[in-house]
Image (cartoon, grey):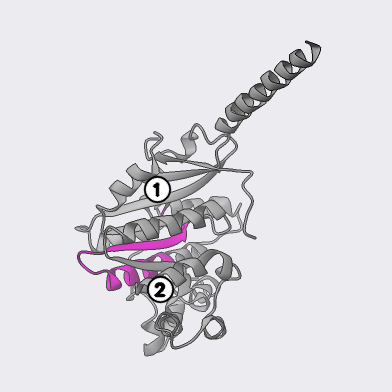
Amino acid sequence: MLKMKSSLVLICFSFFLLFSGSLWGQKKAAYIIYNKKGKKVSYKKMLRTLKKNDIILFGEFHNNPISHWLELEVVKDLHEINPIILGAEMIETDNQTALDDYLNSNIDAVGLDTLARLWPNYKTDYAPLVDFAKDQKVKFIGTNIPRRFASAVYRKGGFRALDELSAQELKWVAPLPIPFDPELPQYKNILKMMDGHGSPALVKAQAIKDATMAHFILMNYQVGSTFLHFNGTYHSDFYEGILWYLQRQNPKLQYATITTVAQKNVFELSDEHSGRADFIICVDEDMTTTY
């Protein structure tokens, strides 16, 4: 009898552990997706909205594995619905030839790494996107201005630094002169974030990146396709940055934005993140990083 009671207690305790473990598991989430009003939405609902747009700006944290995983998932799923074109801040415009050679199997991954200025986390975070494009015969566009040109804008105090570029080099930059509004809230915030160490030239360096990315997105967009672009969150948050330039140049296209934020509690979006993008991927701030 004692042995039977002990077995019964053990069984009940096992069920308790299983049930309580299930409850604890339900309180954990790596991420939750919200819309711009702070309402939780499913991945499927987000995808249904995204597929209706011509151009999508996916704002990522460069070292966040959830950002990178969801980027690849969105690419795969949209590819099954619409013709897609991919583009990224992480590859600069003057490296397009090397990228095309890789996509067309004229060079291998080592050759691409040799010929192009790839980011240190390329192999873990961006190679899966590029390799998907290669395997599926999808165009992949490097959209960012060569870093040395943006640095020159910052070091030399403004856009006049670009007047020194050759005709060939100007092909890698948005047509000059670019529109520029220093009163855009995100540009003004750059100076605040730098705690007094920023300058108008730093804001202009950001603007020439935004303008160049927008230019190459529109230059390579094709009617009937979806152009999915990957960039740091600040380049498209609050519908500014790249999107501001896109809408100035072609207001008739349909645009959607995604951003990434990190919070201690992912189950309720903080007010500061409301309205940041059409879809907000809220990631647990304890999430491990890729670097």
Q: Is residue 49 above or below residue 220?
A: above
Q: Residue furthest front?
A: 1
Picture coordinates of residue 62, whole percent (x, y) = 55, 59
Viewer-side residue, 220 vs 109? 109
Q: Residue at x 32, y 52 (%)?
A: 256
Label 1, secondary structure: give it: helix
The earlier-in-sequence mark between 2 and 1 is 2
| Residue indicated by mark 2 | 135
Q: Residue at x 70, y 16 (%)?
A: 8
- State which mark lies toward you, 2 or 1: 2
Residue 238 marker:
1
Q: For residue 233: magenta?
A: yes
Q: Is residue 205 above or below residue 15?
A: below
Q: For residue 191: magenta?
A: no
The answer to whether any part of residue 262 appears in the image is yes
Mark pair 2, 1: CA separation: 34 Å
Residue 178 marker:
none
Name the kind of residue labelled 1 in the image. Phe
